[in-house]
Image (cartoon, rainbow, N blue to C red):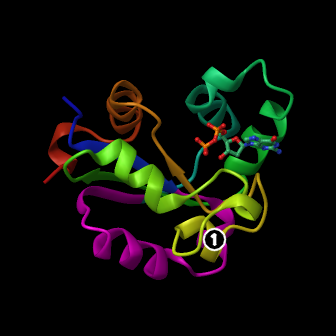
Amino acid sequence: MAGNITFTMIKPDAVAENHIGGITQMIEEGGFRIVAMKKTKLSEERAGKFYEVHKERPFYGDLVKYMSSGPIVAMILEKDNAVEDFRKLIGATNPAQAEEGTIRKKYAKSIEANAIHGSDSDENAKIEGDFFFSADERF
Ligand code: DGI
């Protein structure tokens, strides 16, 4: 059975352009409940750890630099079928391929500065949520 938790980050480009409110509104209107939320900044070391699964990919170095270039907003979200439904709401990795009505279609600037992250499995949703939040930060 699909889990009811996913993890997201509003990425540095979207935070810098004051889209926290717009994106959070799309998330809540999409039926997700915010369980935990914080604005923080990743060091290069922590960004590298977060994206360790992509270590062998050619864009890893750029991705780590970009994700540590400014503050992000991390959230744990709750909804039935959370991981899959949230990936639908954010749209394709490359905004040129993102469908109308998705967060990336509206806010992403490029394949790298693509406004928002969404976990790709229940297992990663748990790992990523635990990376940012302790038990007493979840409600
Ligand atoms: O799960 P997604 O964020 O949709 O995509 P992913 O897990 O394949 O890649 C993670 C992030 O890495 C993605 O949000 C942006 C970046 N990325 C992915 N493919 C490319 C990329 N960055 C660059 N510069 N070039 C790529 O081809």
Image quadrant holding the C terminus, namely: bottom left
Q: For the point 46% across and 55% down, which residue is it?
A: 88
**22 in magenta:** yes
Taking the image as drawn, is residue 71 in sight?
yes
- What x and y, as percent, mark residue 43? 64, 41
Provide residue 46's location: percent of width, then percent of height: 59, 33
Check residue 124 for magenta coloring. no
Q: Amino acid at mark 1?
A: Lys
Image label count: 1
For disc 1, the marked residue is: 105
The image position of residue 78, as x and y in percent, is 22, 52
The answer to which of 21 and 49 lies nearer the viewer is 21
Residue placed most toward the observer, 107 or 14: 107
Element at badge 1?
helix
Q: Is residue 68 visible?
A: no
State which quadrant residue 89 falls in.
Answer: bottom left
Looking at the rendering, the stretch of residues picked out in magenta corresponds to 10-38
Q: Is residue 19 above or below residue 13?
A: below
Q: Residue at x 40, y 31 (%)?
A: 121
Query: In the image as oriented, which residue stretches furthest toward the top?
Result: 56
- Does residue 15 appear to the left or right of 58 in the view shown? left
The residue drawn where x is 70% and y is 37% is 44
Q: Quadrant of residue 127?
A: top left
Ligand 1 within 8 angstroms of badge 1 C-beta: no
Q: Image quadrant of ligand 1?
A: top right
Name above or below for residue 66 compared with residue 56: below
Residue drawn at the location 30% of the way across and 76% of the way down: 29
Q: Is residue 129 above or below residue 70?
A: above
